[in-house]
Image (spheres, rainbow, N blue to C red):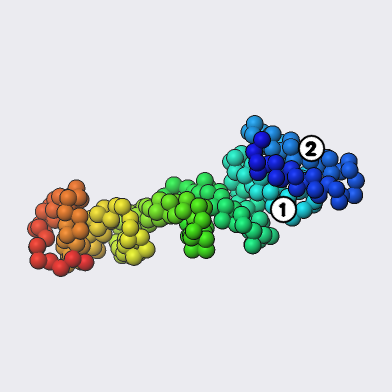
Amino acid sequence: MNPKIIVILALVALCSCTSSTDRAALSTEDYFMQAEDLMARGEYKRAIDCWQKVLGAYLSPQLNMVAELQIAKAYYMRKQYPEAVATYEDFLKQHPNSGRVPEAMYNLGMSYYQQRLTPDRDQTATKNALITFQNLVNMYPDTVSAKDGAKMIHSLRQELAEHELYVGNFYLRTKSYKAAIGRFRDLFSLYPDFDRKDEVYFLMGKAYYLDGDLSRTVETFNAMSHDYPSSPYVSKAQDFLASNRLGTPREDEKPL
């Protein structure tokens, strides 16, 4: 048997000595054992019911914390992510000084992460996941949970940058050139680590041209050539300039 489970069962047995009736305490222990067995077998809905019975017994704060986290985990495993979020958030409010807070914060972040949508849709879940992992890293930097959370931050920032790129490209396609330029510039400011900045340069250069700012067009394309000389977008920019009779950017043009 898992040593951790043995310790918890010992806690249940200790609490049962001070309970109002032996029958009630035994029932709580039975529910605990059933819940652990159901979790192991993947029967999460029934496990939640048993954990709720353990939680309802109020035998000890420690046992309640175990039950709360297991209920949240069961919701997560059932892909009931909003319910998992609510349960983890409630745990963090009720037990702010628990040694299991980093674990709960990481799992909260993952519950948000599982609800994120594609770049063309609302990014609230992605933003919430990012904020949660950032708070975890800032508040508990030396924990294993924080190290795992740090690995999620880069990918979430990439996804949020993808959203900005999508919106900027939408404005470009719908001829809202100033709005597109503003979105692309915000992307550079907010997500300087974006993996597709060469594409952003190219689209922003096109937006400047279509908005009538030829100087900024050449300036932006030249910045792309400077920062990403081997990017396929360099030749695309040259073709775009040639097709619009603007020529090739000068080598001495100062990057953006």
Q: Amino acid at mark 2?
A: Asp
| Secondary structure type for disc 2 | helix
Instruction: Name the one closer to the observer, 141 or 38.
Output: 141
Q: Quadrant of the N terminus?
A: top right
Q: CA distance from mark 1 to mark 2?
A: 17 Å
Q: Is residue 180 above or below residue 51?
A: below
Residue 247 found in image quarter: bottom left
Instruction: Name the one closer to the observer, 54 or 126.
Output: 54
Point 49% across, 63% down: residue: 138
Relative to 223, 111 lies left or right? right
Q: Position of residue 122 (x, y in %)?
A: 48, 53
Q: Position of residue 73 (x, y in %)?
A: 62, 44
Point 17% across, 59% down: residue: 226
Q: Position of residue 256 (x, y in %)?
A: 21, 66
The earlier-in-sequence mark between 1 and 2 is 2
Residue to which mark 2 is pinned: 30
Residue to which mark 1 is pinned: 62
Instruction: Name the one closer to the observer, 190 or 30.
Output: 30
Query: Is any atom of residue 240 visible in this view?
Result: no
Mark 2, residues whose alpha carbon is within 10 Å: few (<14), some, or many (≥20)?
Answer: some
Relative to 197, 155 lies left or right? right
Point 20% across, 58% down: residue: 227
Q: Position of residue 249 (x, y in %)?
A: 11, 60
Residue 54 found in image quarter: top right
Mark 1, residues whose alpha carbon is within 10 Å: few (<14), some, or many (≥20)?
Answer: few
